[in-house]
């Protein structure tokens, strides 16, 4: 399974921008047939970050599904309107699910939050780094009671790993962070993985589903 996301940082009043972002999401879903969700970046992201995401089986499926959008007048009008408020370039991220073998059957609903953690494996440590990435996700899951998805970023900085943990809302994020901070096995194993990753490459952020 691939998780493909497009990110844009927008400037303007949320009450003005959100209807456009939702309209773009709905039109893209309608034309492509993909189940596209819309997320707002919170802590760890530039203010105004919006994320459109869809789970697909392959890049070929995504390309075929989204091809009609290039000629769709309604979609392009919405895109032009949104681009006029963009503060920089948009970005597309393609992530391949490594563990668990299958994603959760029930999608996260509006109001849900996802804790996004990334880090870049150092040269010469790819196998060890990936094995540790899956291990630490299991340890974190045992400590928090929440499933942690491990993804390989297929483009961008080589060797980037992303951990995604979903919650019904921000209260779940608070609870998980508190449990991890008090988990001796998690903290001990976290230190053991430091040698597999480039120093200073780790990032952490929160996105919340708005549509």
Image (cartoon, grey):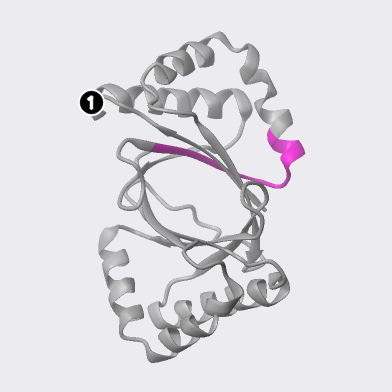
As drawn, is 42 to the left or to the right of 161?
A: left
The location of residue 173, given as percent across then percent down, is: 31, 65
The location of residue 140, given as percent across then percent down, is: 45, 78
Is residue 191 shown above or below 31?
A: below
Is-magenta flag for residue 51?
yes
Q: Nearer the viewer, residue 77 or 204?
A: 204
Work out whether residue 64 can be spotted. yes
Q: Nearer the viewer, residue 187 or 207?
A: 187
Circle 1 residues within 10 Å: few <14, some 14–19, many ≥20:
few
As drawn, is 9 to the left or to the right of 99?
A: left
The location of residue 28, given as percent across then percent down, is: 54, 26
Q: Nearer the viewer, residue 145 or 190?
A: 190
As drawn, is 59 to the left or to the right of 82?
A: right
Q: Residue at x 52, y 16 (%)?
A: 75
Q: Residue at x 59, y 12 (%)?
A: 72
Res. 184 image quadrant: bottom left
- SS for dot 1: loop
Work out whether residue 114 can be spotted. no
Magenta span of residues:
50-62
Instruction: Single out the residue that lies furthest toward the right.
Output: 60
**Quadrant for the C terminus in the image:** top left
Is-magenta flag for residue 45?
no
Q: Residue at x 71, y 31 (%)?
A: 63
The location of residue 171, given as percent across then percent down, is: 25, 64
Q: Nearer the viewer, residue 142 or 86?
A: 86
The residue under label 1 is 13
Q: Residue at x 58, y 80 (%)?
A: 135
Res. 134 image quadrant: bottom right
């Amino acid at each position: 399974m691939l998780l493909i996301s497009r990110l844009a940082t927008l400037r303007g009043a949320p009450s003005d921008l959100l209807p456009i972002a939702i309209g773009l999401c709905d039109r893209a879903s309608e034309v492509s047939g993909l189940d596209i969700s819309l997320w707002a970046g919170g802590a760890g992201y530039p203010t105004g970050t919006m994320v459109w995401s869809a789970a697909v089986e392959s890049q070929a499926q995504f390309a075929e599904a989204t091809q009609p959008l290039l000629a769709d007048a309604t979609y392009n009008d919405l895109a032009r309107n949104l681009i006029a408020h963009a503060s920089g370039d948009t970005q597309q991220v393609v992530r391949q699910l490594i563990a668990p073998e299958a994603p959760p059957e029930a999608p996260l609903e509006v109001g849900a939050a996802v804790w996004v953690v990334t880090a870049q494996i150092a040269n010469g440590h790819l196998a060890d780094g990936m094995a540790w990435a899956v291990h630490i996700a299991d340890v974190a899951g045992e400590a928090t009671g929440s499933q942690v998805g491990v993804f390989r970023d297929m483009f961008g900085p080589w060797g980037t790993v992303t951990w995604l943990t979903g919650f019904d809302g921000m209260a779940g994020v608070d609870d998980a962070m508190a449990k991890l901070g008090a988990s001796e096995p998690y903290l001990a194993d976290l230190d053991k993985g430091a040698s597999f990753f480039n120093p200073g490459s780790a990032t952490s952020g929160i996105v919340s589903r708005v549509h």
